[in-house]
Image: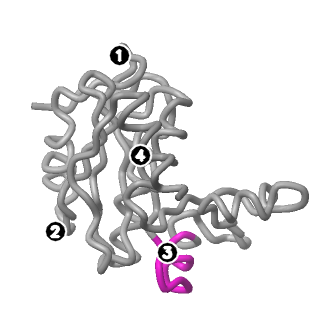
Amino acid sequence: MKKKVYQFIFFKLMGWKISGTIAPEIKKCVMIIVPHTSWHDFYLGLFTRGIVGLEMNWVGKKELFQFPFGAYFRWMGGEPLDRKKNENKVDAIAEVFQNKEVFRLAIAPEGTRKKVEEWKTGFYYIAQKANVPIIPVAFDFGKKEVKIFEPFFLTGNKEEDFNNLEKNFIGVVGRVPDFSFVPKK
């Protein structure tokens, strides 16, 4: 029932579409969501997750998961990140991957909703350390389309991998067009 409501709102009322999907057998991956220009990306992600029907996750500092919002954030796919002394975020998130049977991490490689010229590298090193594919996902406000691309398996050549990943986002326009990520040609 909830899926039908999401579909009605997303497809009929909002006029959006989804192209591509994530194969259910891919239980662990890093989903890079580009461009990230507005808070509107959050509910687009929620609708997409509800329509696709697969568990999708995010991480936040463990303090967010305390009372009164902890249960809600977990229900929304959140996973508390407990950064132990001397442990960096990449290691801590890779450990989450090890401890979960299903973990599809959604992350914005821009690291902000403002204009950036280059992506941050954390998502890459998380995928590398956790030994999981990267699934590019475009929120294209210009075409009102969520595009889910094929899984990308890292080669170990970061520069080449970034160039190949960025090609998925050529011409994609964010909610705030001026903040949209423009891939290098």
- Mark 4 vs mark 1: which is more N-terminal? 4
Residue that carries the numbered disc 2 in the rendered image:
155
Say which mark, if any, is on residue 137.
Answer: none
From this viewpoint, which residue is outermost toward the left?
185
Residue that carries the numbered disc 1 in the rendered image:
177
Q: Secondary structure at mark 3?
A: helix
- What is the image's colouring? one colour
Q: Which residues are magenta?
A: 93-103
Which amino acid type is marked by label 2? Thr
Q: Relative to residue 46, is residue 76 drawn left or right?
A: right
Q: Secondary structure at mark 2?
A: loop
Density class for disc 3 (Cα within 10 Å; few <14, some 14-19, many ≥20) is some
Is the Cβ of the residue at disc 4 closer than 8 Å to that at disc 1?
no
Which amino acid type is marked by label 4? Gln
- The residue sitting at 48% across, 86% down in the picture is 101
What is the C-alpha distance between the residues marked 4 and 1? 26 Å
Residue that carries the numbered disc 3 in the rendered image:
94
When the figure is inspected, residue 44 is found, relative to residue 2, above or below; the finding is: above
Judging depth in this view, the residue of 80 and 95 nearest the camera is 80
Disc nearest the viewer among 4 and 3? 4
Density class for disc 4 (Cα within 10 Å; few <14, some 14-19, many ≥20) is many
